[in-house]
Image: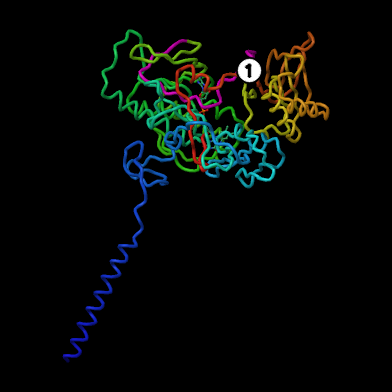
């Protein structure tokens, strides 16, 4: 009995010791805490690489460009330049494939643009063409340099009270634009809530939003939601960028919160569906949107910012610029230019397959559009240019155009001017006579103002930022 009791105690003691040792071992081999950094919005510690802030739930990707380091000194040299596609941003539209001058260097595999390194020469046409900023040309360096306006974590620029959101700030995709518009106005509301409303004989709004794309609409709706007076000023029609691309499918792969509306989640929806959603939201909320008014500048006016357009000016306490990165195309100023068949940019060549397209212009962008269109099956392309020769164009484009004209793929009308656009024809003045050209689409590529030119005029600091090669600006 004694032996049994003694044995029991010894066994128990051994087991306790083993258990304590294991527990100690477990404690000492527990994974080290992940490194964190403060969330730019609420300052809660968020593990580096996590998708959402554990404190306020904001998608941390929103601040990828904002938080990137400003580049100093000359860019590193060396390495062979190659295009690199970011799989999490590519929307599979194929614009890069049409833009690439090297046959087969980039192709769509499923819905993902895929680079053939052996054929890629790193021209960068795909980078310029990509509508969502998913491609960059890298030389194997750890970082890429991107030119973006400098904004802080609230999306405010160095011009106090002037905010920049959406694609203009360097990030593509609808969800980013919506999130940024909301966050900027959240900050505006916080700043204005404690401030005394300024005296003014002239009527003013709390927030003037320039641009009615996803970023601008989200900013305007957030302003309304927070009880701020606001106006959205748009050069074209509501959400003009989305409206103008001949694209059938849009991907919103995850729900986004639209102020005053709720979750928006339309996977594989048409652009028409998205536009319809926006139009309904604007109608239901009464968000004031002034279309057909192009903003030229924003200047300081005492306690206000004055937004100036061709039509007039608007006084505002804060201004949110959400003008995208497509700029303001120069227009012909002819009757019929407002028709839906008229485009100033081509983002998807395939959509014009089998159509009769008139391209207007004589520079590289017009010629590149012509060459891309001429490669689409069954497309008839006519090029109208008022000059006598395409002498402003890169030699490479001149040669390609000459070959396309010779092969009968393109008809060139030098010395012609477009007088009127109708639903099924365009009227051109050519050799003192009127030529009636039947067509389905008109693509006008006669230059315009790049959005950064406007920013420089406004005094906004533009910087080069260093992004790791896993991330690219839009
Ligand atoms: C073919 C194509 C396919 C795409 N597919 C997807 C997709 O599947 N999923 C996705 O998330 N994103 C997609 N995108 C990208 C997405 O559309 C953009 O990232 C998004 O529209 C950017 O929103 P934004 O509000 O910043 O700018 P924009 O949508 O470009 O809006 C800017 C607005 O400002 C106006 N404006 C410009 N200058 C002035 C001025 N001076 N005065 C007044 N108004 C002005 C413009 O007319 C325009 O309406 C696609 C883009 C293209 C082109």
Q: Residue at x 48, y 23 (%)?
A: 211
Q: Nearer the viewer, residue 255 or 118?
A: 118
Looking at the image, residue 448 sits to the left or right of residue 215; the answer is right
The reply to whether residue 240 is in sight is yes
Where is residue 434 shown, x and y percent of the image?
77, 11
Q: Which residue is mark 1?
A: 337
Element under disc 1: loop
Q: Is residue 463 magenta?
A: no
Q: Position of residue 466 (x, y in %)?
A: 49, 36
Q: Is residue 130 left or right of residue 213?
A: right
- Against 406, residue 416 (above or below) is above
Residue 116 located left or right of residue 432: left
Q: Is residue 230 visible?
A: no
- Beta carbon of the mark 1 residue lies under 8 A of ligand 1: no
Along the line of sight, the residue nearer the viewer: 221 or 284: 221
Magenta stretch bounds: 312-337
Where's the N terminus, which quadrant?
Answer: bottom left
Q: Around disc 1, counting alpha carbons within 10 Å, would you say few (fewer than 14), some (14 to 19), or many (20 or more)? A: some
Q: Is 164 in front, or is 260?
A: 164
Tell me the colour scheme of the image.
Answer: rainbow
Give how far across and how far down residue 67 sits, in percent.
Answer: 42, 36
Question: Which residue does the image show at 47% across and 15% down from the upper left?
Answer: 297
Specify the quadrant of the image occupied by residue 201: top left
Judged from this view, the residue extending furthest toward the bottom is: 1
Taking depth in this image into account, of 432 and 29 the one nearest to the observer is 29
Q: Position of residue 32 (x, y in %)?
A: 35, 55
Which quarter of the picture shows residue 24? bottom left
Q: Is residue 203 above or below residue 472?
A: above
Residue drawn at x 47%, y 43% as measured from the top left: 254
């Amino acid at each position: 009995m004694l032996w049994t009791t003694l044995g029991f105690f010894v066994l128990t003691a051994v087991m306790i010791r083993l258990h304590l040792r294991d527990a100690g071992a477990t404690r000492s081999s527990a994974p080290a805490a992940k490194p964190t950094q403060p969330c730019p919005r609420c300052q809660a510690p968020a593990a580096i690489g996590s998708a959402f802030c554990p404190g306020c739930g904001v998608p941390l990707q929103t601040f990828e460009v904002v938080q990137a380091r400003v580049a100093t000194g000359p860019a590193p040299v060396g390495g062979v330049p190659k295009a690199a596609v970011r799989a999490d941003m590519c929307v599979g539209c194929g614009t890069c494939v049409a833009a690439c001058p090297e046959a087969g260097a980039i192709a769509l595999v499923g819905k993902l643009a895929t680079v053939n390194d052996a054929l890629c020469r790193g021209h960068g046409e795909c980078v310029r063409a990509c509508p969502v900023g998913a491609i960059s040309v890298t030389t194997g360096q750890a970082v890429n340099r991107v030119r973006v306006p400098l904004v802080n974590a609230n999306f405010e620029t160095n011009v106090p009270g002037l905010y920049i959101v959406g694609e203009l700030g360097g990030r593509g995709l609808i969800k980013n634009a919506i999130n940024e518009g909301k966050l900027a106005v959240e900050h505006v509301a916080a700043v204005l809530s404690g401030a005394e409303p300024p005296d003014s004989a002239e009527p003013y709004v709390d927030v003037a939003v320039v641009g009615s794309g996803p970023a601008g609409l989200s900013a305007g709706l957030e302003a309304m939601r927070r009880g701020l007076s606001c106006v959205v000023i748009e050069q074209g029609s509501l959400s003009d960028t989305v409206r103008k691309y001949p694209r059938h499918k849009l991907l919103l792969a995850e729900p986004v919160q639209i102020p005053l509306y709720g979750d928006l989640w339309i996977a594989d929806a048409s652009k028409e569906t998205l536009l319809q959603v926006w139009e309904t939201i604007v109608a239901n909320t009464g968000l004031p949107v002034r279309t057909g008014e192009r903003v030229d500048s924003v200047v300081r006016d005492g306690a206000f910012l004055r937004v100036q357009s061709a039509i007039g000016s608007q006084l505002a306490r804060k201004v949110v610029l959400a003008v995208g990165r497509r700029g303001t195309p120069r227009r012909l100023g002819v009757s019929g230019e407002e028709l839906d068949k008229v485009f100033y940019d081509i983002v998807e060549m395939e959509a014009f397959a089998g159509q009769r397209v008139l391209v207007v212009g004589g520079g590289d962008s017009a010629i590149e559009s012509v060459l891309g269109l001429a490669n689409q099956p069954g497309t008839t392309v006519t090029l109208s240019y008022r000059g006598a020769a395409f002498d402003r164009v890169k030699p490479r484009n001149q040669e390609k155009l000459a070959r396309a004209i010779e092969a009968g793929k393109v008809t060139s009308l030098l010395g012609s001017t477009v007088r009127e656009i109708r639903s099924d024809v365009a009227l051109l003045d050519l050799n003192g006579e009127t030529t009636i050209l039947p067509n389905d689409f008109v693509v006008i590529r006669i230059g315009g103002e790049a959005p950064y030119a406007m920013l420089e005029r406004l005094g906004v600091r533009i910087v080069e930022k260093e992004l790791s090669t896993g991330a690219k600006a839009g």
